[in-house]
Image (cartoon, rainbow, N blue to C red):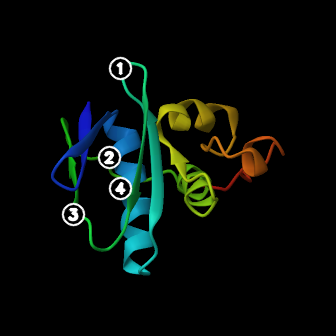
Amino acid sequence: MGRLHIGHETSAELDDDLLEHVFAVIVAKLRRHESVLLEWDCPDGHTEQVLVSTSVLVRAEFASTRPDRLDHAWLDSLMLAANSNGGICLSVAALALRAGAIPTRHPDVRDHHLRVPNLPH
């Protein structure tokens, strides 16, 4: 398990593969000077939301070696969520990939059963 550090006070523990993909989407958004909303459920039961912008330090700490290739379908799904009003829900991102769904809790995206197109690898 890796850790996504956001600013100096907030961090979220993520599977290294998910962390690699989420970090790639965050970097792409920040390079365009676009912010991205991240949301996750904490072990104590509360939900945390963070708006990541170019003024916030973001750092990925991986527990293992990074994968050779990124899954483009998963990146597309995460980018669709990042571009939605609800942002990326880290708590459902891995499950959403297996279901082919967009990893957000925003009803305009989630409830319309949008699916990520199958892309050749």
Residue beneath the point at 50% across and 50% down: 71
The one nearer the camera, 102 or 98, is 102
Residue type highlighted by circle 3: Leu
The one nearer the camera, 5 or 10, is 10
Q: Residues within 10 Å of mark 3 (few under 14, many from 20)?
A: few
Residue type highlighted by circle 2: Pro
Nearer the camera: disc 4 or disc 3: 3
Nearer the camera: disc 1 or disc 4: 1
Q: Is residue 83 above or below residue 86?
A: below
Disc number for residue 43: 1
Which residue is the extreme one toward the front? 46
Measured in 3D between alpha carbons, the distance from the residue under mark 2 to the one under mark 4, in whole angstroms, is: 13 Å
Which residue is the extreme one toward the bottom? 32
Is 46 placed left or right of 76 in the picture? left
Residue 23 is drawn in which quadrant? bottom left
Residue 120 appears in the figure: yes
Residue type highlighted by circle 4: Phe
* Circle 3 residue: 57
Measured in 3D between alpha carbons, the distance from the residue under mark 3 to the one under mark 2, in whole angstroms, is: 23 Å
Discs 3, 1 touching: Cβ within 8 Å = no
Measured in 3D between alpha carbons, the distance from the residue under mark 1 to the one under mark 2, in whole angstroms, is: 27 Å
Is 29 placed left or right of 96 in the picture? left
